[in-house]
Image: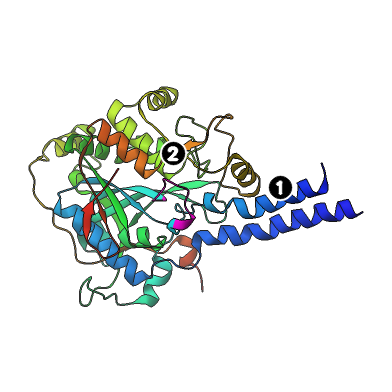
């Protein structure tokens, strides 16, 4: 009896705790609409000053002290210089953000969503931003792919926050960005070939969390999966590892961060 | 398994998963709040309001969308690497409300 009671208590504790943890995704501490609009416009201007047609941008969706060692940004997307038609019928130049977002009610499932600078920052807990601007030839290839049906075909809706970038079964936002970049570089090819190329050239970020914690997370948290890691050390695609990949193979024309004070500074990859 | 081991695993599950929940990929649309937020200040522009975006087209492809893929390729080829800064609107942009927001009373 005592044994069963303890089991029930443990199960209840896990179940009760889950919503509170999931709620932290959209919880307090996020930027206001005014802050998001201001930060978004700072980013748009920084990109436009550099003549960027396509850039890779990252924001911080969770306090830094809660992120695993070596991971500084939590959401990565493409920003594409666009003609934006407004509800009043006018058109303005600006940037459209091409995102992979988790569903609010099903965090283990994702959708491709295009939004704009203000929306991009509403999920952020700080204004700090990181930017990778690809070389013009890479931008040109990216733009051609992003504007084609081939872009959506690279999406896998089965989401894991620690998705293995060398495996096809799960995908997160950064892996989608990486898959798009890889396809822009190599052209359309079999998905397995793309992953084999990534295994050969891309160095994923090790996730510095103990195996016990990862196991507990995979049991208790719907958007954490170990199924695509096949018992190997958990590694995932991050903004940092993506930036190092692009720098190593000379795919970048510029990279920088925008700080909390709005000032631009060099990005250390 | 002894009870204290089960307790240990359970407590680990409670407290361990937090840092994994990056939560950075969730969508946060300005649409739900933009209409009540009204004017946006703090230096974006003196009287800027969020521009509700309906749709967009990559500017390098404007005029080529809907045409043969060769035309899109031409638009891309016309883009000079030596181009300088690009014009960008002062208006802060946000997406329109989602369909479910549109039918809320």
Instruction: Tell me which chain the residue with mark 2 is part of.
Output: A
Q: Is residue A35 above or below residue A199?
A: below
Asked whether residue A73 is drawn in magenta, I would say yes
Task: Give the number of the disc on residue B9.
Answer: 1
Q: What is the span of residues highlighted in magenta in the rendered image?
A: A65-74
Tell me the quarter of the picture where residue B14 sits.
Answer: bottom right
Q: Residues within 10 Å of mark 2 (few under 14, many from 20)?
A: many
Seen at 22% across and 54% down, the residue is A265
The answer for how far apart the CA atoms under marks 1 and 2 are is 35 Å
Q: Does the rendering let one see residue A93?
A: no
Instruction: Tell me which chain the residue with mark 1 is part of.
Output: B
Look at the numbered disc 1 and give the secondary structure of its residue. Answer: helix
Q: Residue A19, percent across and down?
A: 62, 60
Look at the numbered disc 2 and give the secondary structure of its residue. Answer: loop
Q: Does the rendering let one see residue A193?
A: yes
Seen at 30% across and 51% down, the residue is A130
Residue bearing the label numbered 2: A155
Magenta region, main secondary structure: loop
């Amino acid at each position: 009896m005592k044994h069963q009671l303890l089991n029930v208590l443990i199960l209840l504790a896990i179940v009760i705790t889950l919503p509170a943890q999931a709620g932290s995704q959209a919880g307090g501490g996020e930027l206001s609409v005014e802050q998001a609009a201001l930060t978004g416009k700072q980013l748009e201007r920084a990109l436009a000053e550099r003549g960027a047609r396509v850039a890779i941008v990252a924001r911080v969706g969770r306090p830094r002290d809660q992120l695993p060692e070596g991971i500084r940004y939590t959401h990565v997307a493409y920003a594409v210089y666009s003609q934006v038609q407004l509800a009043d019928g006018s058109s303005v130049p600006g940037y459209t953000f091409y995102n992979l977002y988790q569903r609010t009610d099903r965090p283990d499932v994702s959708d491709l969503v295009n939004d704009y600078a203000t929306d991009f920052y509403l999920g952020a807990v700080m204004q700090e931003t990181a930017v990778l601007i690809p070389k013009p030839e890479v931008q040109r290839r990216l733009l051609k792919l992003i504007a084609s049906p081939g872009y959506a075909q690279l999406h896998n809706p089965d989401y894991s926050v620690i998705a293995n970038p060398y495996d096809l079964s799960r995908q997160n936002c950064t892996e989608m960005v990486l898959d798009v970049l890889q396809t822009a570089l190599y052209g359309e090819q079999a998905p397995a070939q793309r992953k084999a190329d990534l295994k050969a050239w891309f160095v994923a970020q090790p996730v510095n969390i103990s195996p016990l914690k990862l196991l507990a997370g995979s049991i208790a948290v719907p958007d954490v999966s170990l199924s695509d890691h096949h018992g190997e050390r958990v590694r995932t695609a991050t903004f940092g590892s993506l930036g190092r990949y692009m720098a190593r193979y000379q795919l970048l024309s510029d990279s920088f961060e925008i700080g909390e004070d709005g000032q631009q500074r060099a990005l250390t990859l | 398994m002894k009870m204290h081991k089960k307790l240990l695993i359970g407590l680990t599950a409670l407290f361990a998963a937090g840092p994994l929940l990056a939560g950075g990929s969730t969508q946060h649309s300005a649409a739900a709040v933009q209409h009540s937020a009204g004017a946006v200040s703090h230096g974006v522009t003196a009287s800027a309001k969020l521009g509700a975006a309906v749709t967009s087209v990559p500017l390098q492809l404007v005029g080529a969308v809907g045409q043969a893929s060769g035309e899109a390729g031409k638009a891309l080829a016309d883009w000079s690497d030596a181009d300088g800064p690009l014009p960008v609107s002062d208006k802060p942009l946000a997406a329109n409300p989602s369909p479910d927001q549109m039918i809320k009373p």
